[in-house]
Structures are given as C-alpha cells and as structure tokens.
Image (cartoon, rainbow, N blue to C red):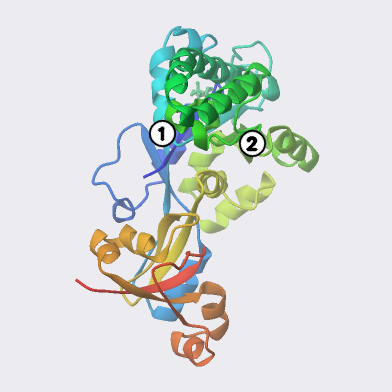
Amino acid sequence: SLTLGIVGLPNVGKSTLFNALTNSEVEAANYPFATIEPNVGVVNLPDPRLNRLAEIFGSERILPATVSFVDIAGIVKGASEGEGMGNQFLSNIREADAICQVVRVFSDEDVVHVAGKVDPLADIDTVATELILADLQTIEKALPRLEKDARKNKDLAETVESVKAAEAVLTDGKTLFAAGFDTAPIRELHLMTAKPFLYVFNADEGVLTDADKRAELAAAVAPADSVFLDAKIESELLELDPEDQAEMLESIGQDEPGLDSLARAGFHTLGLQTYLTAGPKESRAWTIRKGDTAPKAAGVIHTDFEKGFIKAEIVSFADLDANGTMAAAKAAGKVRMEGKDYVMNDGDVVEFRFNV
Ligand code: GDP
C-alpha cells in the first residue's frame, strides 16, 4: 500500500503525532497486513457514506479505507551530505510515496527549537533545501551517463532535456512538486522532491482559531495540502466519548479531530480514491488510484476478480442515497452495468460480476 513519510526538524511534534496515529487503533481487519510495522501508523479515512450504506443494507460492520504514515528518523541540516542519520533518512524517504512534513507553529519556552525561534516557513525551507540538494546530487551523478547514452540512442535526447530542466528548477531553490514539474520522463531517477508534499502545522489554540493565519500558511505551501492540528491533544481526543470530543474540538476551533483531517489530506496527496461495496455483512470502502478502471478496482478485493472480470453493477452513492434502496435506485434507472473500460468514480457503489 502507498505510504506518506513523516519528516520534520527535531522537536516539532513528530513523535507526539506519530503516537496519536498508532493509538488510533485501526481495526486489524481493516488493514491488509497481519502485523503493522512498528514505524508505521495507520488511520481510518473517515467516511460518513459508510454509515448510510450500513443503514440501507443492514450491514453488521463498517470497514473504512485506511491511510499509512511511516515515521522517518529526524532530518538534520546537512542530511544531503550524509551527516548524522542523513543517508538512512534519505533512503527511507525514497521509499515513501509522499512526504508529510510536520512543522512547528506552537510556542513553548520549555521546548527548544533547533533554529532558535519558531518560524514555520523557514523550517519548511530547511527541509526542502536538504531534499533539493540530494536531488541535485542524484542528477549530477546520472547526467554524464545519460548524455553519453544519448549520443548512441537518440530516444534519450528528451530525457536529457528533461533532467536539465529539472536541474534548473532545483538550482532555483524550488522542489519539483512545488514547480508542478512533469517528472514522468525522468521517473527512473526517483527524485525526492518530485513526490507530493503535505504539511502538518502543529499549532496551539491561538493559531488553530485564527482563520487568517491558517490561510496565510496554507497559501505559502500551496499546491501542497495543509493540515492544522495540535499534536499534543490528538491522543487525548481519542480517549474521549463523542460528546466530550465535540466539546474539546469546539474549544480549539476544529470541526473534526486533526487525525481525520490528516487522513483525508494524506489520501488526497497520494492521489487515491475509494469505491464502496455494501451488503448485510459489511459496508466497506476500497482504495484505488484515481483513473483506475473497473477490473483494476475489482483486483483490490481479489486478484481473481480482476482476472475473471465480466462487468460491474454500479450506482453512485448520491443516487443510492437519494433513492433510499437499491430497488428504488434500479427502478429510477440509476443503476448501470459497466464493462472493462469503465473508469471508476469516487463513491461508486459496486457489485462485480466475474468468472471464477
Ligand atoms: P519530535 O522531535 O519532532 O518527534 O518532537 P516530539 O513529538 O518529541 O515533541 C517535542 C516536544 O514538544 C515534546 O516535549 C512534546 O510534548 C512537545 N509538543 C509536541 N507537540 C506539541 C504541541 O502541539 N504543543 C506544545 N506546547 N508542545 C508540543
């Protein structure tokens, strides 16, 4: 499954957030692997549509999709030069599918800031710079070989051009993601700043309730997604019953737990979407990539479903919700039979027909 790697400067609240993630205790059945690795935190993707499906189908249980975060040992200035944990850090980031940087916004005199003062945008720059330098090193190593190969193989001319263009973006101090750079032609270099970024602003009440300040930070990191939360109270929230939780959230100006917002943003950053299945046993969300076809989606349930795919009976959640039952949705002509070329939409409620 796809993962987001959690990074950030020391003392910004990474471990605090990661502990909350691991305390969220995703039901084992939700997670496709028997054991969750100690450095992986898995959270449910909140999805109220599943409650409605469970009501319509009388499902015994609800299984939401999940999002996985990998805790990556702290970045230090000079990581790109292999300082400290640098090399390990970089190789761990290479394995993640997206980068989730925790950024300190909270002020607390008892918690030392490595750079001496709380400055979220400067911290973001520090981490980006290390990743940019590491990517430039990768390019420096790869370019002479590519240029040499391109002299024999004309097809590589475009790749060389693309690598040089990427180098220019990076030299200019921008990540490839922030620049919207098309990295498809140079995928084989596995450049780190090509990965999508997500920023978690670890803030206290003052900032969480300040819409202008939040908008300002979010705008500064766009097109990356931003999440605002207080890492310290996320674990506490998990312990509360819904009523007390709602009260606590209101006091810090949040309409849902930060982990829920983080799950949504993580899912979005990874380019994922869900489709839904429902029956008396369970209502369930399944994770696919945007653009996946019906057989590919079926393969997430079982590889045999993909191989033996015949067709899919599909109704959009909105149509099913509006009609109230599957029979009513059918009578209203809202249930379609789709073939193997059908591209899935988020919230499709599906029943696959397949040969075994
Ligand atoms: P890491 O080095 O990034 O993993 O940071 P930690 O999670 O260990 O947090 C460093 C210190 O900051 C700890 O003492 C935490 O209790 C504290 N801390 C973390 N998040 C918050 C927060 O949102 N507000 C405040 N005031 N302190 C926090």
Give coordinates of residue 179: x percent, y percent: 66, 32
The residue that mark 2 highlights is 180
Choose top left, top right, bottom left or bottom right for residue 216. Answer: top right
Tell me the SS state at disc 2.
loop
Residue 64 visible within the image: no
**Residue 63 falls left or right of residue 319:** left
Give coordinates of residue 207: x percent, y percent: 72, 35
The residue that mark 1 highlights is 70
Query: At 49% across and 26% down in the image, what residue appears?
Result: 191
Choose top left, top right, bottom left or bottom right for residue 227. Answer: top right
Tell me the SS state at disc 1.
strand
- The answer to whether 202 is drawn above or below residue 348 in the figure is above
Identify the amino acid type marked 1: Val
Query: At 41% across and 33% down in the image, what residue appears?
Result: 70
Q: Does label 2 or label 1 sit earlier along the sequence?
A: 1
Ligand 1's image quarter is: top right
